[in-house]
Amino acid sequence: MVWHSGKTDVTKGQLFRQVPRLLFGSGVISRLGQLLPPIGSGRLFIIDSVLEEQNIAKRLPIGHSDVVEWFPAGEHEPSTAQVDELRDRIVGRSTYLPTGVVGVGGGSTMDVAKAVSVMLTNEGSSSQYQGWDLLRRPGVFKVGVPTLAGSGAEASRTSVLTGPTKKFGINSDFSMFDAVVLDSSLISGVPRDQRLYSGMDCFIHCVESLQGTMINELARSYATQGLDLCTKVFLEGGSDEELMTASFMGGASIVNSEVGVCHALSYGLSMELGFRHGFANCVVFNVLDDYYGEWVNRFRTILRAHDICIPKGVCSGLDSDAMNRMVAMTMKMERPLINALGEDWQDQFTPGEILSLYESM
């Protein structure tokens, strides 16, 4: 199998999607209030619970009518059940919707904020909207404040959730943030391993975008610059501002192109083994030499520079049912696989090939 070189005609003339308002720079969290609508019936702040001990709430413009929900992002990947429960709790408190939703944390917390925003205005369970362009109505005004760089959730139209039978994104223009705050001071204390795994998520976003069939020149520019910055940060000691920039650029690139083989496979690992997204991507990317060649070698160079060793044999304890569920989950990721391999991806990326890759991890 040879990784795809990419084409430019698939998305010719497409609408380029991007978050309309952005505050950037160290300390700009103090200006978050400039982006928010009036308090009115109150605003909803969804904050990663790991930040509670850091007194992050003191840096946010939280008023008396606002509601704070501490989300346990560190426990496991976010689920549709959590989103539905949080939405129901908010709706049960008042006859009026919040005037805004603010997500403060890593990719999981921002994904939950995006999902809650749209589920406040769309009926039913969030599991009904796992897919592409299934939402019927815009969500409540929402702002993303990343405290971990790499996921690109601040720039993407996807809210990735684990549902009853699958891990899949709510993927819609309605689920993009209306504004984001990129404050490098918020990522300065991230633990080394977590910083790298999340940063490699950005690295992989850029690679999969650049090597895909859905690429266009504007997305290519974002991915190229994001990849250069990410490499600089992890091999030359670049700054936190450069890492936040890379994360945003990687997210902006994939929202206007697509991810690829690595993400299609990583969802199965997260679903069956509970791996966090950035770590799952690293485990998968480490075995994709036949698909992303030189980029896998650069990825390993970065890991060696930071003394990080990706474990092997992670699937060895899974039974055949679990392995088959992961294969089935991967086969559902049609758009990423079309992006990576073309319209005839099923001829190349067979269930046997997928199973073999999982067994090699």
Image (cartoon, helix red, strand yellow):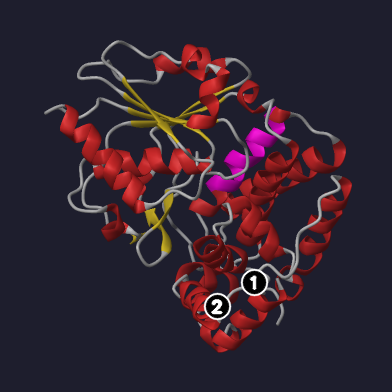
Query: Where does residue 118 sit, x and y in percent of width and height?
Result: 28, 43
Q: Name the residue under label 1.
A: 315
Residue 145 seen in the current view: no
Image location of residue 274, percent across then percent down: 54, 57
Q: In this view, does 251 lie to the left or right of 47?
A: right
The relative height of residue 330 versus residue 299 in the rendered view (above or below) is: below
Q: Which amino acid does label 2 sit on?
A: Met
Q: Whole-percent x and y of residue 16?
A: 45, 48
Q: Nearer the viewer, residue 229 or 117?
A: 117
Query: Looking at the image, which residue is at 52% across and 85% down?
Result: 346
| Labels 2 and 1 touching (C-beta < 8 A) | yes
Instruction: Rate crowding at label 1 as few (under 14), some (14 to 19) or many (20 or more) other CA atoms within 10 Å.
Output: some
Percent across and percent down for residue 26 are: 63, 18
Label 2 to label 1: alpha-carbon separation: 8 Å
Q: Give the range drawn in magenta.
A: 241-252
Q: Against 153, is 35 above or below?
A: above
Which mark, residue 208? none
Q: Name the residue under label 2.
A: 323
Instruction: Please identify the quarter of the rendering in which residue 234 is found.
Output: top right
